[in-house]
Image (cartoon, rainbow, N blue to C red):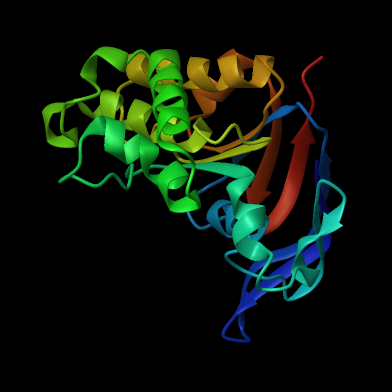
Amino acid sequence: MIAFEHVGKRYGGRFEALANIDFRVRRGEMVFLTGHSGAGKSSLLRLVMRLERPSRGRVRVAGHDIDRLHHSQVPFYRRQIGVVFQDHQLLFDRSIYHNVALPLEIQGVEHREVARRVRAALDKVGLLHREAALPIELSGGEQQRVGIARAVVNKPALLLADEPTGNLDPQLSADIMTLFEDFNRIGTTVMVASHDLALIARLRHRTLRLHEGRLVADEEVA
């Protein structure tokens, strides 16, 4: 599903965020990406999202060299990826329903289909009963669940999360990770960047560890 082939990323011609990164993630796999702050986790995810382009090497997603995508193809490519951010990035003047509906509305999906998909996504994250609420009325954990619902409403083949539990307490963090496991069980490829090593160890999935922009460990769970 994802292949990094000797990928490097420099910023400003000098700062090397990633160096000679080489790994593959199988379709339907769940993988954690960990490392200290500044290790390169976010840069790696931005390459997968095609928000950045590699300085060298090749990034393939679903068999395609995404650096070769024409600019007109990039929006369609990104629709196949769900993204969850640490800070939720919700619109606080819109209801939970309309936050989750936004990606579908931008694509011009028919109104009844939008309603069906939004309510199905909210039901999966346990927030169907709060669809009319504003984000400010929700707890931090509930806001993150809204972010997850928005990320999966388009039924992506690939789900990426950048420190999705960074601002949550241990129990809420575990609950959020369980949601990612639930989506992985139905076939979604999931990659989660996290520095919560204790939680990662309990969940027992493959872990890629970065240190100063280099992949220093690729740990499979027996």
In front: 120, or 5?
120
Please give the name of the residue rendered at 41% of the width and 27% of the height, measured from the top-left corner: 118
Q: Is residue 68 left or right of residue 193?
A: right
Please tell me whether residue 117 is drawn above or below residue 160 in the rendered image: above
What is the quadrant of the N terminus in the image? top right
Please tell me whether residue 135 is drawn above or below residue 222 in the rendered image: below
Q: How many marks?
A: 0
In front: 178, or 93?
93
Residue 52 position in % (x across, y down): 61, 68
Can the viewer see residue 49 in this picture?
no
Please give the name of the residue rendered at 40% of the width and 14% of the height, measured from the top-left corner: 123
Q: Is residue 195 left or right of residue 165?
A: right
Please tell me whether residue 174 is drawn above or below residue 150 in the rendered image: above
Quadrant of the rendered image containing residue 29? top right
What is the quadrant of the C terminus in the image? top right
Residue 126 position in % (x across, y down): 36, 12
In front: 117, or 53?
117
Quadrant of the rendered image containing residue 74? bottom right
Please tell me whether residue 165 is drawn above or below residue 170 in the rendered image: below
Can the viewer see residue 111 in this picture?
yes
Quadrant of the rendered image containing residue 212? bottom right
In front: 114, or 69?
114
Please give the name of the residue rendered at 20% of the width and 35% of the height, measured from the top-left corner: 95
Residue 34 position in % (x across, y down): 59, 40
Please give the name of the residue rendered at 43% of the width and 52% of the height, measured from the top-left corner: 106
Looking at the image, the residue that sits furthest to the left is 137
